[in-house]
Every structure is written in structure tokens, then in C-alpha cells.
Image (cartoon, helix red, strand yellow):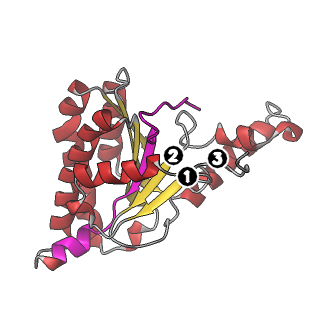
């Protein structure tokens, strides 16, 4: 697990549930995919704002394991949008020092998209200014289940003593094994639930629920939330002396 350092008491790792794209589009009489396109542009702004705000790690929830339940047209449109985003943003992300990782189960994703994901990870592997993690076909419970399977295989093969298994052991098998736990989780659009996002990793994260729809979530709003975080007292289960 990586070590985190933040500026002025702010969070080093922020995770965002980017909600409200569809409603934003519907409010404007446009199809839901129009909102997703606007949301993708907002990602670019927030990523670029991270260095000045002291955020070194940013994890965004792009597509959940439950999102396959949406209409076939919306899912297909989203998959096309993901491909276009990677192709369009790859060189800019590289130039701006952003390292990109993807978490989630890739088996259900189309090979062309997976190939683009693999290429972007390799292309930006040497960057260290901002670590952008994109959760794609991701679910917290699914991640823990997959991690448990990998751990069980190690035990069955005799490479791992079951009596030595603890929280740290399981963490090594998670998709996020090289990342620090998030300090702050933000959900946009006014919904107050975590929707199966980073369940294990967010055990001691602070939460912020904002009514702002994701396409309207500016760098200024982001900075305001980070400022409020700096005033919170985090005890991690302990009692202040």
C-alpha cells in the first residue's frame, strides 16, 4: 500500500462517485448520453486541478457491475465513450504527469476497450504527479470476492498459510493493492449512499454528499469540499487525549 502525503491537512486520496449525468441531460431535454459526454469533460478539469489542491491520488467510479442493467443503448454508448476518452486523452494525460490505472473485472469488457486500457496504463506507468484510478465494471463486493478467490488459490497451492491471513493479507489481493486507502469519498447529485464503491478501502474515509450534479462539479466546488475536509478530526476509532 502506498504512503500518502497531503497539503495543509487536505486529503491525499480522493474517491468520487460521479453521479447525475443522466439527470443533468434530462433537465436540458437531451438524451442521457449527452450528460455522460459532459461528465467526461468534467473529469479532465478535476484531474488537472488535483496537483494545485494537494490531491495526489484520484479514484473515479466510471461504470459499476450493476450498470449493465441499464438499457442496451446507454451501455453501448458508454463503452464507446470510454474508448473515445482514452484515445483522445492519452497524450494529454502522459504530458501532464498523470499515471492511469483501471480497477474492476475486465473479463466482461470488449477486447478493443481492454487493449486501450492496457495501453494507457503502460503509456503512463512512469508518471507520478497524479495517480488517476478509473473504476470500470467495478463493484466493491465483486472485488472482495475476486480477491478472496485469489487468496484461496494461494492457500490451496501451499504458498500461503491460512493461519497467517489477516486484513493486510487480503488487502494485497485487492484491485487497489498498490494504492493508499481514500481519505475522502465524494458523491455528487444529492444521493446519500455509497453504491458498492470501495467498500473495504473506505472503512475510515470521510464522506461528503453534494447536491451538485457531476457535469456541474467544478474545480472551485472541489476546492471548497477539500477545505471542509481539512477541518475534520479523524480519530480512526481512537479517543482524543
Question: Crowding at label 2, few (<14), some or many (≥20) Cα neighbours within 10 Å?
Answer: many
Q: Is residue 14 magenta?
A: yes
Q: Which residue is mark 2?
A: 182
Q: Is residue 222 magenta?
A: no
Measured from the top left, where is residue 9 in percent x and y?
47, 39
Q: Which residue is mark 3?
A: 147
Residue at 28%, 26% (x, y): give it: 97
Q: Quadrant of residue 188?
A: bottom left
Looking at the picture, does residue 234 appear above or below residue 116? below
Question: Crowding at label 1, few (<14), some or many (≥20) Cα neighbours within 10 Å?
Answer: some
Q: If you read the primary sequence from the N terminus, does the residue marked by circle 1 or circle 3 appear first?
A: 3
Disc 2 and disc 3: Cα gap in Å? 19 Å
SS at mark 3? Answer: helix
Q: Which residue is mark 1?
A: 205
Number of numbered discs visible in the structure rendering = 3
Q: In terms of depth relative to the viewer, which is nearer, 84 or 100? A: 100
Q: Quadrant of residue 215?
A: bottom left
Disc 1 and disc 2: Cα gap in Å? 6 Å
Residue at 16%, 40% (x, y): give it: 88
Q: If you read the primary sequence from the N terminus, does the residue marked by circle 2 or circle 3 appear first?
A: 3
Task: Specify start and end residues of the magenta stretch as a single range.
Answer: 1-26
Residue 107 visible, this orientation: no
Measured from the top left, where is residue 71 in percent x and y?
30, 75
User: CB under 8 Å between callouts 1 and 2?
Assistant: yes
Amino acid at each position: 500500500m502506498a504512503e500518502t502525503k497531503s497539503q495543509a491537512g487536505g486529503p491525499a486520496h480522493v474517491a468520487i462517485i460521479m453521479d447525475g449525468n443522466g439527470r443533468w441531460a434530462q433537465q436540458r431535454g437531451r438524451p442521457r448520453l449527452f450528460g455522460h459526454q459532459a461528465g467526461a469533460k468534467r473529469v479532465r478539469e478535476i484531474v488537472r486541478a488535483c496537483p494545485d489542491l494537494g490531491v495526489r491520488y484520484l479514484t473515479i467510479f466510471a461504470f459499476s457491475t450493476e450498470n449493465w442493467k441499464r438499457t442496451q443503448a446507454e451501455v453501448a454508448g458508454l463503452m464507446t465513450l470510454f474508448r473515445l476518452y482514452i484515445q483522445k486523452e492519452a497524450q494529454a494525460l502522459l504530458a501532464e504527469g498523470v499515471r492511469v490505472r483501471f480497477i474492476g473485472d475486465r473479463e466482461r469488457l470488449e477486447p478493443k476497450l481492454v487493449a486501450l486500457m492496457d495501453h494507457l496504463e503502460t503509456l503512463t506507468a512512469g508518471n507520478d504527479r497524479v495517480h488517476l484510478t478509473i473504476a470500470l465494471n467495478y463493484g466493491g463486493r465483486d472485488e472482495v470476492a475476486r480477491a478472496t478467490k485469489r487468496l484461496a488459490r494461494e492457500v490451496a497451492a501451499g504458498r500461503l498459510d491460512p493461519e497467517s491471513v489477516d486484513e493486510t493479507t487480503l488487502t494485497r489481493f485487492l484491485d487497489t493493492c498498490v494504492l493508499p486507502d481514500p481519505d475522502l469519498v465524494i458523491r455528487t447529485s444529492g444521493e446519500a449512499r455509497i453504491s458498492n464503491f470501495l467498500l473495504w478501502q473506505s472503512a475510515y474515509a470521510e464522506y461528503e454528499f453534494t447536491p451538485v450534479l457531476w457535469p456541474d462539479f467544478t474545480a472551485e466546488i472541489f476546492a471548497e469540499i477539500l477545505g471542509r475536509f481539512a477541518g475534520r478530526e479523524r480519530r480512526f476509532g481512537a479517543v482524543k487525549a
